Amino acid sequence: MNAAAAPLRMDASHGRAQLQVALVGNPNCGKTALFNLLTGTRQKVANYAGVTIERKEGHYTAPSGRSVRVLDLPGAYSLAATSPDEAITRDVVMGQHMQEAVPDLIVCVADATNLRLHLRFVLEIAQLGRPMLLALNMMDAARRRGIRIDTASLSQMLGMPVVETVAVRHGGANALIERMDSTQPSPLAPRPSSLAALPDLHAEVRAILAATVSIPRRTAAVDDAIDRIVLHPVFGLAILAVVMFLIFQAVFSWATPLHDGIADGIQAAGNWIGDTLPAGALRSLLVDGVFAGLGTVLAFLPQILILFLFILCLEESGYLPRAAFLLDRMMLSAGLTGRSFIPLLSSFACAIPGIMATRSIPDPRDRLTTILIAPLMTCSARLPVYALLIAAFIPQRTVLGVFNLQGIVLFTLYVAGIVSALAVAWVIKRLRRDQSEHALMMELPSYRMPHPRDIAIGLYERGMIFVKRVGGVILALTVLLWFLSSFPAPPAGASEPAIHYSLAGMIGRALHAIFSPLGFNWQICIALVPGLAAREVAVSSLATVYALAGEGADSGLQAVVASQWSLATALSLLAWYVFAPMCISTLATVKRETGSMRNVVVLAGYLFGLAYIASLATYQIAKAIGA
Amino acid sequence: MLLSELAMGASATVLEVNDNGPGDRIAQRLRDLGFVTGEPVRLVARGPLGADPLLVQIGYTRFALRRAEAARVTITTEAAA
Ligand SMILES: Nc1nc2c(ncn2[C@@H]2O[C@H](COP(=O)(O)OP(=O)(O)O)[C@@H](O)[C@H]2O)c(=O)[nH]1
């Protein structure tokens, strides 16, 4: 196709021809950094239709006034795609994608320090014969390592323009911008005939490198030195443990004050607005529905942002694949991959950021398994429930001289979650239709200093995805639950708390028939309904059901529970919360991250089934032995 | 000799990548990544558990390969770089 003659699209706003550019390149070539440098915050992140692969597009205005739209295609090693991401890249550059127009110009980005690998892909795309341009990125790193590239003869041998870029430097893409601005995209120039005689692309790469590039040594000395320690069987694991501990601490404890602060702040704002309104349904809707929902959504943000701050830094610096390398074997025995570890670890704080972090897992099967077992990691929202029941029922006693019985119970609950997660992962692996080998084949890139702008843009994206796409669902469902808990209003002279007469109360009492074999009384069943919004809400709902409110509700509740419930009931509820399918925020995130309602149903269904069986067994056994 | 049998720190030259059954995408990918005849490789690290995965230096790049993946690559240590 001769694209120089192809009609150029008109930019509606300026009436000038608009240029459509697609960025392609191997993973780790610095494509994201280049995209950020070109488009800054003028980016739009969406999904490709029908799949959950991120589609990133941005635009900028060139010096000539022409508007340039840039599509950042997923990183790929080859057009022989082995993952859904790579298939998107293949389809777009080959002009076979259903929704995506053929780009006017393909900008191939290559890491100048890793041309042996990256040039092969450049040549593979060049075979398509479309107008293209090579951006030799990381030229700063190449110069530091003494790599010299004769760009003029490289350009001549490739038959396409070659520009140098440094994607992490201000103005580092100017040569690229000018080049695209000053010339129309044109088809490839004829290449030296000596290259055509070579048997394959690898041979061509070798010939081109021999003629145009001089490289003093194979790898960067720093990389070798760092890897000797970081990948060491003993020191490497020790460093990994420290890094993991830091992340866990940060997400678990640093985020908590922020979490509470935001929740309290939103509640105060709700109360303040509520005070200006007359008591009644509207005020209750605003305070207990809308503001409570808003509080739930925003309170997740600190955890998500803190976790992703770490993950983005680890990813950008090149450490994340090293962590996956160290842990791969261990995770593989559970049917997972080394890349599953950090999402699962994060899920101990909260499954939502954990599930969002699974995006770094390339194999879709591994990713789905990780998502499905993430809710089994004991998240911090279960702690209030555990704390209430353990304090009420498990005596403060020392076992074997050193251990605290309450601590042992809590530890057992954590272990129960992990063991069931491993079992579920194992079962999923057996049940899967596609039993073909899962590949690792993971590149360990050079260590790089993360760039603050790229981290900031990445954090902003994660935050917006959560607030916009997941937040709406959580808010809507919280309002729905408020409605269920508030209507119909109690009759005049009611003796029970208001929630007893509401739809939630009716549902709870109806559920009692299903849950009585587990030892749940009707108060628990009612509290489970609003507890859908977030697990910790179940505790405050229980207080509401027992008509306890205000200061001292927590200690009051503990006394009521201790005197009115049997130990068997308490143990059964603890077992229930190990699986606890009832967290709509998690379900909304799974819907958003996998794009499939089926996965949500599978997840909720299996968690509910496991919770029911575990509670049933716990209650019946406990009762049989006289608890 | 197979790449999975290479000693720690040793260098070798790739002979070929063998398909494990028809249309083996892992083998195809290994070839795309540069595991082709005559290419020098070196084993630079091994995972802490069961010496798996293997970290293989090829060209200017390091790839982590599981043992089953590395076993698709036949190598020779003669005249290794
Ligand atoms: N020194 C240097 N580092 C770069 C350059 N471009 C990108 N990087 C860094 O290389 C790493 C990988 O870049 P990224 O854009 O995430 O790669 P992608 O996988 O192609 O999207 C990041 O740490 C970047 O900050 C460059 O031109 N010079």
Image (cartoon, coloured by chain):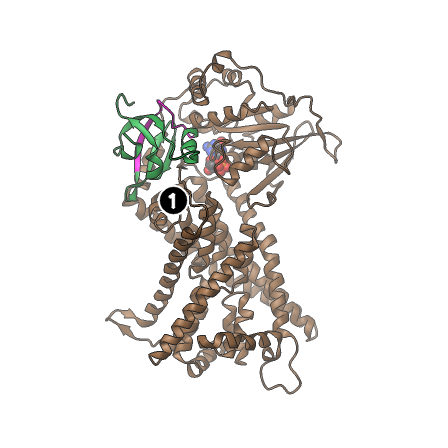
In the displayed structure, does residue A49 sit left or right of residue A345?
right
Residue A190 on image: x %, y %: 56, 14
Q: Please name the residue shown 48% across and 12% down the image.
A: A194
**Would you place residue A560 above or below residue A58 in this image?**
below
Q: Amino acid at mark 1?
A: Ala
Quarter of the view holding residue A400: bottom left
> Is residue A503 at least partly visible in the picture?
yes
Question: Chain letter for brown?
Answer: A
Chain displayed in green = B
Q: Is residue A37 magenta?
A: no
Is residue B44 located in the magenta-colored stretch of the structure? yes
Residue A63 image-quadrant placement: top right
**Percent x, y for residue A544?**
54, 77
Left-right relation of A378 to A2: left
User: What's drawn in magenta, residue-wise?
Assistant: B33-45
Q: In the rendered view, would you say A557 is above or below A319?
A: below
A166 left or right, relative to A275 = left
Residue sticking out furthest to the top: A193
Residue A128 percent location from the top left of the image = 56, 25
